[in-house]
Amino acid sequence: MTAALLAWSIFLAQVFLALAMGCAAFRVLRGPRAQDRVLGLDTLYVNATMLLLVFGMRTGSALYFEAALAIALLGFVSTAALAKFLMRGEVIE
C-alpha cells in the first residue's frame, strides 16, 4: 500500500507541476507588463526544476537532479539580469 501511495502522489505532483507550468507560460506570453513576464519566467524555471526533481525521484536517476541544478543556477542568474535590466536599462555598467 505504501509503494502504491507514493507512486500515486508522485504522479499527482507531476500533473500539478505541469498545470503550474502552463499557468506560468500563460503569464509569460500574456503579461501586460515586462515585470509580469519576468515573474512568470521565474515561476516557470522554478516549476521546471521541481518537475525534474520529481522525475528524478520517480526514475531513481541522478541525471535529473544534475539537470535541475543547472536549470536553477541559470534561472537565478537570468532573473537577476532581467530585473537589473528593467530597473536601470542596462545589465553591465
Image (cartoon, rainbow, N blue to C red):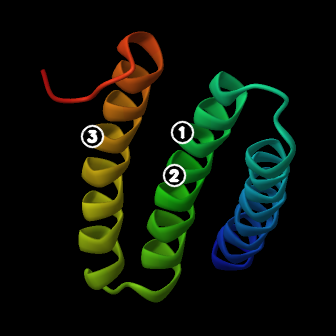
Q: Position of residue 28 (x, y in %)?
A: 73, 46
Q: Position of residue 52 (x, y in %)?
A: 48, 69
User: On the image, which quarter does residue 68 sit in?
Assistant: bottom left
The residue depicted at 80 percent of the width and 57 percent of the height is 16
Q: CA distance from mark 3 to mark 2?
A: 11 Å
The residue depicted at 45 percent of the width and 65 percent of the height is 53
The local secondary structure at tag 3 comes to helix
| Quadrant assignment for the C terminus | top left
| Vertical comparison of 13 with 88: above or below | below
Kind of residue at disc 3: Val
Badge 2 vs badge 1, beta-carbon distance below 8 Å: yes
The residue depicted at 42 percent of the width and 32 percent of the height is 82
Front in this rendered view, residue 34 or 71: 34
Q: Residues within 10 Å of mark 3 (few under 14, many from 20)?
A: few
Q: Which residue is mark 3?
A: 77
Q: Which residue is mark 1?
A: 42
